[in-house]
Image (tube, rainbow, N blue to C red):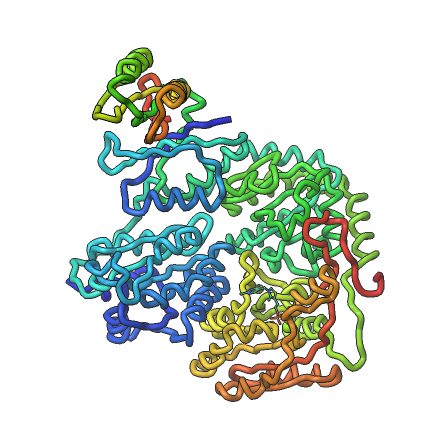
């Protein structure tokens, strides 16, 4: 099963090396990892999606917690949370195919953010299944040139922040 | 106001560091100048690997933090094996390395190596200090992190310019780390649950490890053992925390464990693992390990729980908290518990009597096990024993009668050949009044034999007993047992004369070739002041037994001696 972890870390040089080094050394199955600043300037928040059973997920949490720069880890799978990922997709698009692509984009509530003679770039944020579905349709009907995904980020519902859980 | 280099010396003093081990070079010249001016005690080894193992041996023997200094690039990379060795055995070290100047970082400059990146998987934490103002805080944290909780090595990489830069020095009184709060006390309710399991168990077994030696909890462990009457087994790293001749002690468990220890582990219904990490050399085939038992795991590091062996109960906290709390519960029902386990104890003792450790005695050849037993008698088990890695290491674990905690210094986790000699020097440096004896193979001694010169230069009176079996014994044992006796590159037959080697470096050299000489030469070696090397000729083809082949169950031992 997949677990989404909110990992709060000190915003210091080398923190990401420590985290990624640990993950690879312990051979953990990490599906995605996304990092960025938070409401506190000295804290970085990393969302990690781990694949594995309860024992493996416990090891991931315990081993990551041992890192001196890791302040707090919350398992957002255990609480109600909102999860999002952002994707940018560059598809093949000619004058003839553009309107069909626009239709697809509308259905998915995605956005077109760049167009030129041969390509269009589409932006979509949503959960994994929705993004996968859009990619599939575009690939089948028009052909995808390249994709970039941010990896999942997640936030719990309700007033309590991850750092206080 | 003072320089960064002076600030480091001040910080070392503030941490009560009385000696550092190291080797100078370009990036740490300013720091070495400050050492010189402050007349700070520094041991110059012949190789940075020697310095880091010496700092490790010092730490293991004294319980204090070992400190090592090396220059950037090759100086720092020469520390890597020693840092990894300390990391695997949870030894507190602070390694201070020089780094190239800030403008040169990241340009493949002369003697630049990303030691922080290199040591990330083998340190508890590491730092790169680019600003002199950060230095006092970083050093305070480094020592605190190295020593507290589950100890471990910390690397502080300092760029060259920082040593000369000036700061207004103030050593912080305390550390503030949001992400690091070592646990002392755990949950008392779990102690109640453990107590309940103890009283229900028919076949309980206590398994002690390095955590007991490191935490200094051996006295209270002794209480627990005496109050419960339960039998006890040990990992390699746990040896010494209980006297070898304690009537409840069954010896070491695992690949080269005793018959009784391995059988007791297989048959027990409750296993109390105390400061252990269930290494594969202990468990044998993991899925079959202690299969009939409920496991209770005591450790300070929550990440050890359920890492290898699944625990029915976890007691996370310092052993100096958990063990006294458990003893408190147990002491009123001591007689009851002992009565409860009487028949189990009888069984365990019968295993011990049935198949004790034994080996073939030879009339003319010097048997390695006999050397160890002899040294054990001569020293009354009171010396600090250091080993290298190989067959001799396992025989020391089996045949030396350890009496005190911190009396066996050995590279258990990483199994680092070349560890022994420098570690012995570090131990002797920290405990000048104790006898320090090194058991080392003819292979391992050559991995850091340059440190014999260090022993001579500083007059460290370590006694170096080389088990000269003319082979990489442990490897050739595996070749004999599992590779059809094809001795691929394990013969050490050559022309090296260890007596002359010792003498060339200013160390007394002695030799034993026949069994009848053994007693006399050992006594002479122990009585000779200063460092001594004894070249002991032992037979080539002797196996360390019992042995559980890799991946087999603990009760599937190949037994030795007269049992075949
Ligand atoms: C640095 C290092 N290299 C290789 C090994 C693998 N190894 C383990 S034991 C051993 C043989 C050691 O031979 P020796 O020092 O003569 O000791 P003996 O086993 O003969 O007592 C070797 C090569 C190791 N443990 N460490
Ligand atoms: Mg040998």
Measuring 28% from the left and 46% from the top, which residue is drawn there? A13
| Residue A81 in view (yes/no) | no
Height in image: A163 above or below B260? above
Height in image: A60 above or below B159? above
Image quarter in which the C terminus of chain B is found: bottom right
Measuring 26% from the left and 22% from the top, which residue is drawn there? A94
Height in image: B341 above or below B538? above
Height in image: B80 above or below B496? above
Q: Nearer the viewer, residue A113 or B46?
A: A113
Q: Nearer the viewer, residue B399 or B365?
A: B365
Image position of B524 (left or right of A22): right
Residue at the front extreme of this rendering: A96
Q: Nearer the viewer, residue B427 or A3?
A: A3
Measuring 35% from the left and 37% from the top, which residue is drawn there? A71
Measuring 53% from the left and 77% from the top, which residue is drawn there? B462
- Pinpoint residue B437: horizontal percent, then vertical percent: 57, 73
**Where's ligand 2: which quadrant?**
bottom right
- Pinpoint residue B37: horizontal percent, then vertical percent: 24, 75
| Residue B123 in view (yes/no) | yes
Image quarter in which the N terminus of chain B is found: bottom left
- Pinpoint residue B483: horizontal percent, then vertical percent: 71, 61
Image position of B12 (left or right of B427): left
- Pinpoint residue B392: horizontal percent, then vertical percent: 65, 68
Total numbered labels:
0
């Amino acid at each position: 099963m997949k677990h989404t972890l909110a990992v709060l870390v000190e915003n210091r040089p080398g923190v990401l090396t420590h985290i990624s080094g640990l993950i690879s050394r312990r051979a953990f199955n990490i599906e995605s990892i996304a990092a960025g600043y938070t409401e506190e300037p000295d804290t970085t928040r990393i969302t990690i999606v781990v694949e594995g059973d309860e024992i493996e997920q416990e090891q991931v949490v315990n081993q990551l917690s041992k890192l001196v720069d890791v302040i707090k880890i919350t398992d957002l799978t255990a609480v109600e949370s909102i999860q999002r990922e952002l994707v940018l997709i560059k598809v093949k698009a000619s004058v003839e195919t553009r309107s069909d692509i626009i239709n697809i984009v509308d259905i998915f509530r995605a956005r077109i953010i760049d167009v030129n003679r041969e390509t269009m770039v589409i932006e979509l944020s949503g959960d994994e299944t929705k993004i996968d579905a859009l990619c599939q349709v575009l690939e089948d009907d028009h052909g995808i040139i390249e994709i970039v995904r941010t990896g999942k980020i997640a936030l719990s519902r309700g007033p309590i922040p991850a750092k206080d859980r | 106001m003072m320089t960064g280099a002076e600030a480091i010396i001040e910080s070392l003093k503030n941490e009560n560091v009385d000696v550092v081990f190291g080797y100078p070079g370009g990036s740490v010249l300013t720091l070495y100048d400050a050492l010189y001016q402050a007349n700070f005690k520094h041991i110059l080894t012949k190789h940075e690997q020697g310095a880091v193992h010496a700092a490790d041996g010092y730490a293991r023997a004294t319980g204090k933090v070992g400190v090592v200094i090396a220059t950037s690039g090759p100086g720092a990379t020469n520390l890597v094996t020693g840092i990894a060795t300390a990391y695997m055995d949870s030894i507190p070290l602070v390694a201070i390395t020089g780094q190239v100047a800030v403008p040169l970082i990241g340009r493949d400059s002369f003697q630049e190596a990303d030691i922080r990146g290199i040591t990330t998987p083998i340190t508890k934490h590491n730092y790169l200090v680019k600003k002199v103002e950060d230095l006092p805080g970083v050093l305070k944290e480094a020592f605190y992190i190295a020593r507290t909780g589950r100890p471990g090595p910390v690397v502080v990489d300092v760029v060259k310019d920082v040593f000369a830069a000036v700061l207004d020095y103030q050593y912080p009184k305390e550390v503030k780390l949001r992400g690091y709060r070592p646990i002392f006390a755990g949950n008392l309710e779990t102690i109640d649950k453990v107590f309940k399991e103890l009283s229900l168990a028919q076949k309980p077994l206590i398994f002690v490890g390095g955590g007991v030696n490191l935490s200094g909890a051996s006295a209270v462990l002794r209480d627990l053992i005496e109050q419960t009457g339960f039998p006890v087994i040990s990992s390699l790293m746990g040896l010494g925390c209980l006297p070898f001749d304690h009537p409840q002690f069954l010896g070491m468990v695992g690949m080269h464990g005793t018959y009784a220890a391995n059988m007791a582990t297989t048959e027990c219904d409750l296993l109390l693992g105390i400061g252990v990490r269930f290494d594969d050399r202990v468990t044998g085939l993991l899925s079959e390990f202690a299969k009939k038992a409920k496991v209770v795991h005591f450790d300070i590091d929550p990440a050890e729980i359920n890492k290898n062996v699944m625990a029915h109960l976890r007691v996370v906290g310092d052993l100096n908290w958990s063990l006294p709390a458990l003893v408190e519960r147990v002491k009123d029902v001591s007689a009851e518990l002992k009565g409860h386990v009487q028949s189990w104890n009888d069984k365990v003792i019968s295993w011990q009597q049935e198949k004790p450790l034994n080996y073939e005695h030879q009339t003319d050849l010097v048997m390695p096990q006999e050397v160890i037993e002899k040294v054990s008698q001569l020293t009354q088990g009171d010396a600090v024993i250091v080993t290298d890695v190989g067959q001799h290491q396992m025989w020391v674990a089996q045949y030396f009668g350890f009496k005190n905690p911190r009396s066996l210094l050995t590279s258990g986790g990483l199994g680092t050949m070349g560890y022994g000699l420098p570690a012995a020097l570090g131990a002797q440096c920290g405990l000048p009044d104790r006898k320090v004896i090194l058991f080392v193979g003819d292979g391992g001694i050559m991995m850091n034999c340059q440190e014999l010169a260090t022993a001579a230069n500083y007059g460290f009176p370590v006694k170096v007993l080389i088990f000269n079996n003319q082979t990489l014994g442990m490897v050739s044992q595996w070749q004999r047992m599992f590779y059809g006796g094809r001795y691929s590159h394990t013969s050490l037959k050559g022309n090296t004369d260890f007596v002359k080697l010792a003498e060339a470096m200013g160390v007394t050299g002695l030799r034993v070739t026949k069994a009848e000489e053994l007693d006399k030469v050992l006594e002479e070696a122990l009585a000779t002041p200063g460092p001594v090397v004894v070249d002991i000729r032992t037979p080539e083809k002797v196996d360390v037994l019992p042995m559980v082949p890799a991946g087999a169950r603990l009760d599937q031992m190949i037994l030795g001696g007269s049992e075949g």
